[in-house]
Each structure stands twice: as structure tokens, then as C-alpha cells.
């Protein structure tokens, strides 16, 4: 605690030398104290640091818990694990490396290197981008904070930029995964002549804020439309992960893992199910499996799971636009 007390005294006194380096060290320590559940000290440090920064007018530690930030972020404790997901070998390897970098960050920092913490996920809807963000948060043992665009994007000039400042001030002092789903919503190409000057300013502000985040904030941006992203996004993202549409083999693997995890048998060949659900995504496949589980539970102590699965396959085949065999 002596190190924290010393920094608290320095922050309050206004000392610190290199302001940027000092602020980053202070933010890292605040995040560390938050992780250790030293809430009082973390709040004191955050309050003192906030007073140093004239552009932030409130306690940033409390911001993440109050109603204002509640409109900007959805926070939840992640549960999904990397082992629950069907991933290409290269993607799994990349994720393992990022996780290792954060667990061994002290070794990296002793050599003047920070772990990578800006990731871009690209892939079709329902391909597992959100699930992978949650799984990374689980493996790193940090909360998953999903940006709520309905609260972030304002209708008045300058409103979005101000809310963005509030959001980033709230997250930068705690270890977390900050998840931007459909990132092209707020990071569109600034060269697009159809976009307004306000949108272009928002993109510039967003990228600047992302640049300034410390490495204990893992930023994950996901998009279905990589072609719409501003070119500067590609330069800033240290890790790029492409998640392809599910294959037949991938669906069989997912169904098998789900069955083992839940103890629910489908009563039909997994290959048959995968063939009947040719065009569904992993997200839809999970919906289908959950439907089977619900109907099996409600069918009594000895359900005919095969019959349940066949009936739901008929419904899902029509829903997916696939003719029954």
C-alpha cells in the first residue's frame, strides 16, 4: 500500500514530471487497486487524478457505476470459455498469444513492451464475434463492457463527442474488455462524401481515444462490413481476426461440444442436423440447440428427444429457407 499512498500524495501535490507517463502510471495503479477490491484507495486516486485533469469534471471511478455511464455501457460478468467455441486453428493460436501477453505483462514491461490490446474481429453475422469477445474476457478474468450506441450517439452537434469522453474516462482506469459491436456504425470511412462533418469529427475523436487507452483496457471492435471502416482503424488495430461462416464440420463439432456440456442428446446424427441446417450461423445453431433443450425438459422425465429434434428441425429448415429432404 505504501506505493499507492506515495502516488496519492504525488497526485494531490501536482507533482509528476512527464504528465502523460505519470497519468498512465496512475491509471494503471488505479486499475490494479480496483482489481484487488481496494475500492476506497482506488476512488481516492481517481478523484485526485480527476482534479488534475481539467477536462473531466467528475469522479471517473464512480462514473462507471452511476446512471450516466449505465446509458453508455452494458456491463456483465462473462461466462463463455474459449474451449466452448469452434474456432479456426490460427484464430485460437492468436487468442492464446494475446491471453499469454496479458498474464505475463510484467515480463513484457520489464523490456519496455506492452501487451497487445486493440483487436478487430471480422466476419458474417452470428459467426461468433461477440462470443469470442466474451470468452477473452472470461480467460482474462475481467468484465465485458459493451458500448451502447443508442446512449452514445446524440442528435446535437458535439453531443456524441462529449458522451464519448465520458465513456472513455470511465473505462480507462479499470481492467476490462471494451466491446464495440458493429464498429462500422461509429468508425465509418471519413472519405465518404455522404457523411457529415460531425460524423467525421466523431470518428477522429473515437480513434484518438482508442489510441490513448492503457493496455489493461482490451478494445475489441467487431464488424460485418470491414469495407466500411475508416482506413485509420486498420492501422490502429494490433490484432485482426477473421471468423468465417460455419462449415459442416464446424457445426458438427459445435453440436457435439454442446451436447457434452449440457448432457442433452439430440437422438439424430449430428451430421444429419448439420446438413439440414446448412445456412444457419453459430448463433442460430445455439438457438436451435436451446430450443431442443427447452422442449425436452418440458416433455417430461423421459422425453422422446429424437422426436423433439425432428420437429424442431422441420421448423428451423423452413425458417432457414432450406427444403426438407
Image (cartoon, rainbow, N blue to C red):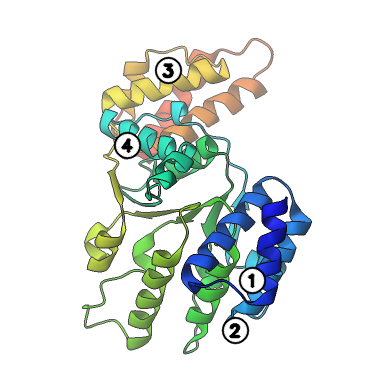
Residue 19 placement (x, y as % from top left): 50, 73
The residue identified by callout 2 is 54
**Helix, strand or loop under label 4:** helix
Residue 256's label in the rendered image is 3
In this view of the protein, which residue sits in the foreground, 5 or 286?
5
Mark 4 or mark 1: name the one nearer the start of the chain: 1
In this view of the protein, which residue sits in the foreground, 193 or 325?
193
- Give the CA distance from mark 3 to mark 4: 24 Å
In this view of the protein, which residue sits in the foreground, 242 or 33?
33
Residue furthest to the bottom: 157
Q: Indicate which label's residue lies in the foreground, 3 or 4.
A: 4
Residue depicted at 68% across the width and 16% down the height: 300
Residue depicted at 22% across the width and 78% down the height: 192
Residue 94's label in the rendered image is 4
Count the marks: 4
**Helix, strand or loop under label 2:** loop
**Helix, strand or loop under label 3:** helix
Residue 213's label in the rendered image is none
- Give the CA distance from mark 4 to mark 2: 39 Å
Q: Residues within 10 Å of mark 1 (few under 14, many from 20)?
A: many
Position above or below: 24 against 100: below
Position above or below: 54 against 176: below
The residue identified by callout 1 is 49
Q: Indicate which label's residue lies in the foreground, 2 or 3.
A: 2
Residue furthest to the right: 40
Marks 2 and 3 close (CB-CB < 8 Å): no
Mark 1 or mark 3: name the one nearer the start of the chain: 1
Residue depicted at 47% across the width and 16% down the height: 266
Amino acid at each position: 500500500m505504501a506505493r499507492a499512498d506515495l502516488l496519492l500524495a504525488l497526485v494531490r501535490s501536482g507533482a509528476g514530471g512527464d504528465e502523460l507517463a505519470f497519468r498512465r502510471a496512475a491509471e494503471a495503479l488505479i486499475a490494479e487497486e480496483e482489481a484487488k477490491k481496494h475500492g476506497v484507495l482506488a476512488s481516492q486516486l481517481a478523484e485526485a487524478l480527476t482534479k488534475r485533469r481539467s477536462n473531466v469534471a467528475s469522479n471517473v471511478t464512480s462514473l462507471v457505476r452511476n446512471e450516466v455511464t449505465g446509458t453508455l455501457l452494458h456491463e456483465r460478468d462473462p461466462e463463455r470459455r474459449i474451449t466452448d467455441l469452434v474456432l479456426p486453428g490460427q484464430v485460437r493460436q492468436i487468442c492464446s498469444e494475446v491471453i499469454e501477453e496479458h498474464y505475463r505483462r510484467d515480463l513484457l514491461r520489464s523490456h519496455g513492451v506492452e501487451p497487445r490490446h486493440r483487436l478487430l474481429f471480422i466476419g458474417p453475422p452470428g459467426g461468433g464475434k461477440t462470443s469470442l469477445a466474451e470468452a477473452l474476457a472470461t480467460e482474462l478474468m475481467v468484465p465485458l463492457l459493451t458500448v451502447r450506441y443508442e446512449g452514445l450517439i446524440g442528435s446535437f452537434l458535439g453531443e456524441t463527442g462529449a458522451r464519448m469522453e465520458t465513456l472513455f474516462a470511465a473505462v480507462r482506469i479499470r481492467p476490462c474488455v471494451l466491446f464495440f459491436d458493429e464498429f462500422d456504425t461509429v468508425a465509418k470511412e471519413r472519405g465518404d462524401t455522404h457523411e457529415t462533418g460531425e460524423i467525421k469529427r466523431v470518428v477522429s475523436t473515437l480513434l484518438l481515444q482508442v489510441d490513448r487507452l492503457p493496455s489493461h483496457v482490451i478494445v475489441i471492435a467487431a464488424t460485418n462490413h470491414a469495407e466500411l471502416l475508416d482506413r485509420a482503424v486498420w492501422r490502429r488495430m494490433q490484432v485482426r481476426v477473421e471468423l468465417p461462416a460455419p462449415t459442416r464440420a464446424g457445426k458438427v463439432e459445435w453440436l457435439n461440444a454442446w451436447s457434452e456440456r449440457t448432457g442433452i442428446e439430440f437422438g439424430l446424427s449430428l451430421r444429419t442436423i448439420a446438413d439440414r441446417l446448412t445456412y444457419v450461423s453459430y448463433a442460430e445453431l445455439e438457438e436451435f440447440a436451446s430450443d431442443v433443450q427447452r422442449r425436452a425438459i418440458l416433455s417430461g422425465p423421459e422425453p422422446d428427444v429424437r422426436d423433439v429434434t425432428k420437429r424442431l428441425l422441420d421448423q428451423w429448415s423452413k425458417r432457414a429457407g432450406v427444403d426438407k429432404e
